[in-house]
Image (spheres, grey):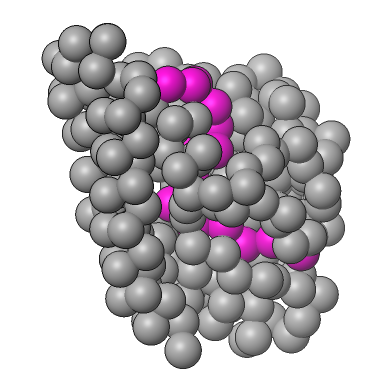
Amino acid sequence: MRIAFVCAQESKHALLVLKAIRKYSDLSVWIPAGSNLWLYHLCDLPLVEFSAKEPYVSWLSSFDAVLYFLTSDSFNLLSELVCVPGIFLIVEDIPLPKFSSYQEFFLHFFFKEDPINRALFIMSQVPPNSKLLPPYKPINLNSPSGELSKTIFEGIRLAHAFLPFYKFMTELKDRFLKDVNRELLKGEFLEKFLKELDTFYNIYKLSVDALSE
């Protein structure tokens, strides 16, 4: 399995993740262009300095999984580099948007540009206080390497299970909603549309959640 580990900060927790998964994957580390993250030069792993432009976007899109390593200090910088759908590996509390319902997230996904809209799965040491569409799994980065590896690869499997719904949402955003008369995206039509989408998502979510049991 080809995995890209994307990070913007030197961290012992990042090294723990790399150690846990490097034996079981074709792993490379991706860091912002021009950054001086010398710690990752010592990992004996392929290291790529990149930006959210071509050809890097196409190269990242070819990986089986992209892990975005997010900390409170690196979030602002790294959020600008979340250019392809991937897994959010959250170490500390970061300013994710808060939603009280899936319908609020649908609207955010369709009409706002935000890194959270490219999350296929969220693994976090800090439970998110929000209704997020991507599946979620708690993670302890200080757990034994074997346990940590198992958690991460289970997360990758759940991300793959969520991917069809993500592609469906993206098609709605990029095709259907761009062609619909803007007047229809208000009032009763929008209310019914979001309600039907919510029903479909909750049914789909049951099958994804079953994989984590």
Front one among 208 and 189: 189
Q: Nearer the viewer, residue 154 or 212?
A: 212
**Residue 19 x/y as whole percent:** 65, 69
Position in image of residue 58 (x %, y %): 30, 30
Q: Residue furthest top?
A: 182
Is residue 13 found left or right of 176 in the rendered image?
right
Bounds of the magenta segment: 111-125
Magenta-drawn stretch contains 113 = yes
Count of labels shown? 0
Res 22 visible: no
Task: Assign the N terminus to one quadrant of the image.
Answer: bottom left
x%, y% of residue 207? Answer: 31, 76
Q: Is residue 89 above or below residue 85?
A: below
Q: Residue at x 31, y 29 (%)?
A: 188
Query: Compared with residue 195, is residue 107 higher up or lower down, i.e. above or below?
Result: above
Q: Residue at x 17, y 16 (%)?
A: 180
Residue at horizontal 62 percent and vertical 47 percent from the top: 100
Q: Residue furthest front?
A: 188
Name which quarter of the figure residue 22 lies in: bottom right
Quick check: 149 left or right of 15? left
Q: Quadrant of residue 44?
A: bottom right
**Can residue 68 be seen by looking at this rendering?**
yes
Q: Is residue 61 magenta?
A: no
- Tell me the quarter of the picture where residue 25 sits: bottom left
Residue 15 x, y percent position in the rendering: 73, 60
Which residue is rendered at x = 36% and y = 24% of the image? 187
- In the picture, measured across the screen, residue 49 lies left or right of residue 84, that is right
